């Protein structure tokens, strides 16, 4: 006597169940690099007012993704902020 081992096809998994966990992503508004817009070629480390806008309240440098800076200006911005920190114009860390 031969046994027929047929595989039973699994019912299709319900894909709709996970949908409630997905967040609706709306397209982000494209940010324009402030320094490009204003035609600032070199970022001044003495410009504390501006640099402060690119740091978090804890003193961290805001990422390019958040700041909207282009790669070139983000690079200059980090250098400027680091210089300002060494000149004690900006805080390394919030107290
Ligand atoms: Zn730029």
Image (tube, rainbow, N blue to C red):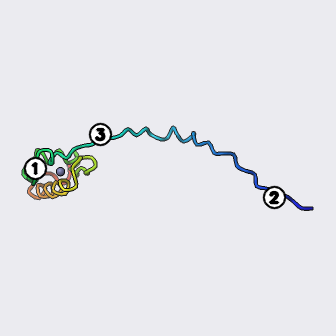
Structural crowding at the residue carrying mark 2, measured as other residues with C-alpha within 10 Å and reported as few (<14), some (14–19) or many (≥20): few
- Outermost residue toward the left in this view: 46
- The CA span between labels 3 and 1 is 23 Å
- The residue wearing badge 3 is 29
- The CA span between labels 1 and 2 is 74 Å
Of 11 and 56, nearer the camera is 11
Dot 2 or dot 3: first in sequence order is 2
Residue 18 falls in image quadrant = top right
**Residue drawn 43% across and 38% down?**
24
Residue 23 shown left or right of residue 64 in the figure: right
Instruction: Work out whether 24 lies above or below 82.
Output: above
- Outermost residue toward the bottom in this view: 1
Helix, strand or loop under label 1:
loop
**Residue drawn 8% across and 57% down?**
87
Dot 3 or dot 1: first in sequence order is 3
**Residue drawn 24% across and 47% down?**
68
Residue 13 shown left or right of residue 31 in the figure: right
- The residue wearing badge 1 is 40
Residue 86 image offset from top left, x and y in percent:
11, 59
- The CA span between labels 2 and 3 is 57 Å
Residue 28 image offset from top left, x and y in percent:
32, 41
Residue 86 shown left or right of residue 63 in the figure: left
Of 14 and 83, nearer the camera is 14
Structural crowding at the residue carrying mark 1, measured as other residues with C-alpha within 10 Å and reported as few (<14), some (14–19) or many (≥20): few
Structural crowding at the residue carrying mark 3, measured as other residues with C-alpha within 10 Å and reported as few (<14), some (14–19) or many (≥20): few
Marker count (numbered): 3
Of 48 and 6, nearer the camera is 6
- The residue wearing badge 2 is 5
Helix, strand or loop under label 3:
loop
Label 3 with label 1: CB-CB less than 8 Å: no
């Amino acid at each position: 006597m031969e046994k027929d081992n047929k595989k039973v096809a699994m019912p299709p998994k319900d894909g709709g169940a996970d949908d409630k966990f997905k967040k609706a992503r709306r397209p982000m508004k494209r940010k324009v690099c402030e320094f490009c817009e204003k035609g600032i070629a070199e970022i001044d480390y003495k410009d504390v007012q501006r640099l402060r806008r690119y740091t978090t309240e804890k003193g961290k440098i805001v990422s390019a993704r958040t700041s909207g800076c282009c790669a070139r200006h983000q690079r200059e911005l980090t250098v400027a902020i680091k210089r300002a920190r060494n000149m004690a114009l900006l805080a390394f860390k919030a107290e």
